[in-house]
Image: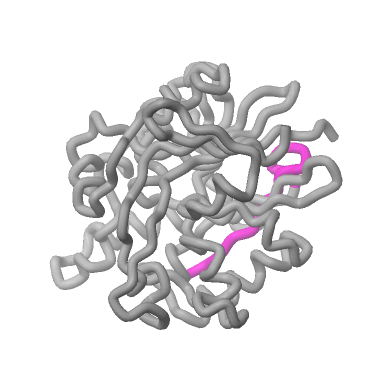
Amino acid sequence: MKDYAITILEYGVQIGFSNAMVFSGYYGDGERTNVTYTFNVLQNEDGVILVDTGYDNRSAEDQALADGVNLTNYHSPAEMLKKIGIRAEDVKHVILTHAHWDHMGGISLFPNATFYLQADELTSWIKTMCMPKEYNTLKASISCTDLENCIGLIKENRLVLLDGDVDNLFPGVHIRVARNGHSFASSIVIVESHNEKYVMVGDCAYVKANITGGRGDGVSMPNGFAVGSTYNAIQTLQDILKYADGKIENVLIGHEVGTWEQYESEADKDGMHVAYVVR
């Protein structure tokens, strides 16, 4: 198996995300947590694989969702890739952890990639988006534009729907599905590289303290946006740690600002970070 270089690219920042959302209201009395918006890049001799896409601000619907959470300092994920010498056109594969706007909204940025998404994730969101307005709370993080772009991949034979867990989707890259927690069927991505397992969790956790405990006491607290149950969300947090062989430092969480201190990282003149998890 060829080892992967693993890089985390930042494309936006949200200052002051309410802890009522970061920790489901289980922790925090008016406190707020800064969060980052990122996606992951896997590279080896066989090419480039992305885990999630960020979003494309040329979509009015996606930009409205970004404005709704006060996302600032946006930079196109395609432009961020250039900082590590990759053209968007050269991305061969994209694993989508789930269908929320900040993870699937950049499909159009990668015109030559094949995309991988859980079948139940796509079909469940289509069903949900057809429900009446009484269910609109469930729809808060979904863009119809993104769903349309995803379905549009079918006619180009660029969409692969997954059915649960997959070993070696690519050599050393494994998928474990998390059902009915943060989303309907989230793909957790396990990457083997240099005799370690690195786990990319999508939004099954917003920050590492979701797993380790907001109060530092080891009591897991799921984040505050979920279509499924608290039980499922907490079980997923425990599973994530197991997938990483108990090494919380190998759990890569896309909204965790502590990433830039934990790994070798740099920031450009605009303040956007690049973290080199594995060179």
- Tell whether position 177 is magenta: yes
Find residue 115 and report its horizontal and vertical position in percent. Answer: 51, 36
Find residue 151 and report its horizontal and vertical position in percent. Answer: 37, 39
Q: Residue at x 37, y 78 (%)?
A: 28
Q: Quadrant of residue 277?
A: top right
Q: Residue at x 38, y 76 (%)?
A: 24
- Tell whether position 99 is magenta: no
Please state which of residues 156 and 77 is positioned toward the viewer in this rendering: 77
Q: In the shown orientation, is residue 231 left or right of residue 225? A: right
Q: Residue at x 80, y 49 (%)?
A: 196
Q: Which colouring convention does the figure follow? A: one colour
| Image height of 130 relative to 79, above or below | below
Q: Quadrant of residue 149?
A: top left
Q: In the shown orientation, is residue 245 left or right of residue 182? A: right
Q: In the shown orientation, is residue 39 left or right of residue 151? A: right
Q: Residue at x 34, y 66 (%)?
A: 32
Q: Residue furthest left?
A: 133
Find residue 81 and report its horizontal and vertical position in percent. Answer: 50, 25
The quadrant of the rendering that contains the C terminus is: top right
Residues rendered magenta in the picture: 168-180
State the count of labels: 0
Find residue 248 and report its horizontal and vertical position in percent. Answer: 68, 62
Q: Is residue 232 visible?
A: no
Would you say the magenta stretch is mainly helix, strand or loop? strand
Q: Is residue 214 visible?
A: yes
The quadrant of the rendering that contains the N terminus is: top right
